[in-house]
Amino acid sequence: MFLECTGTVHVPKTTDNEIVFPFAPLSLKFKINKKDFEHAKPRFEEPQILAGIEKIQRACNNFSEMKTYRFAFFFSLGVTCFFTLIALLFVNKGTRHSSEEDSDIALLKLINRWFMAAFGLEIIAFFQNTLVTIILACKVRRMRQIYEERVYKVTTEMNEELKSSDIRWKLGKCLRWIEISLDYKKKDLMMHQRKDASLINVLEA
């Protein structure tokens, strides 16, 4: 999710048995490809799917907190770029100033006030951007955990309504996606059989 470094998370693709909705970190919402809805017909129709996704995103307040953090991050980045631009102008001014004196000594030792001001601005820009990024990363990590709890609660409620069917809403790792499992009982059975087969192979060996 936005600004979080949790390593590479493989987002699965939509198949005949699972419809996957990846989370878009820039638009901060789940991507919807209505062509994938064909896999769910006639048991699960488009209005039901869209209503479910809307309910999930509404439970997360449409990721408004993340949008605020994103704005703060890009604003901080803009401030850093602005400070860097001013620093470059100071360096240019300092170079012209030093050319009137002993340019080599002034440039190498950075003794005039323009170079010192540029250096000071770059230090401020670096620490400002680093501090803001660290704070936002911590807030985003915490917010993602809150979102996961909310989504889990909502999907549990929706799955209760689908109790009689083989359809289930599922939460992806780190909220990188949500999915609709169209035949979860069959999938769970196959996984259980594979585990049993592995155990039998070990015992036979």
Image (cartoon, rainbow, N blue to C red):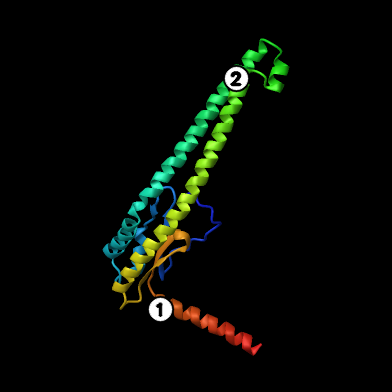
3 is higher (above) or lower (below) than 84: below
Q: Report which quarter residue 199 is drawn in.
A: bottom right
Query: Residue 181 placed where, x, y %?
Result: 39, 70
Look at the image and tell me in which quarter the C terminus lies: bottom right
> From where the camera sits, is residue 20 visible?
no
Query: Mark number for residue 120?
Result: none
**Residue found farthest to the bottom:** 204
Query: Residue 117 placed where, x, y %?
Result: 58, 23
Query: Residue 120 placed where, x, y %?
Result: 59, 27
Residue at x 67% of width, y 13% of height: 99
Q: Are marks 1 and 2 in contact (CB under 8 Å)?
A: no
- Describe the element under mark 1 as helix, strand or loop: helix
> From where the camera sits, is residue 60 visible?
yes
Q: Is residue 189 left or right of residue 102?
A: left
Residue at x 52% of width, y 46% of height: 134
Q: Report which quarter residue 33 is drawn in.
A: bottom left
Residue at x 63% of width, y 89% of height: 204
Amino acid type, label 2: Asn
Query: Mark number for residue 185?
Result: 1
Q: Nearer the viewer, residue 18 or 140?
A: 140
The residue under label 2 is 92
Classify mark 1: residues with Cα within 10 Å, few (<14), some (14-19) or many (20+).
Answer: some
40 is higher (above) or lower (below) than 88: below
Q: Mark 1 vs mark 2: give the one in front.
A: 2
Q: Nearer the viewer, residue 88 or 35?
A: 88
Mark nearer the N terminus (1 vs 2): 2
Amino acid type, label 1: Lys
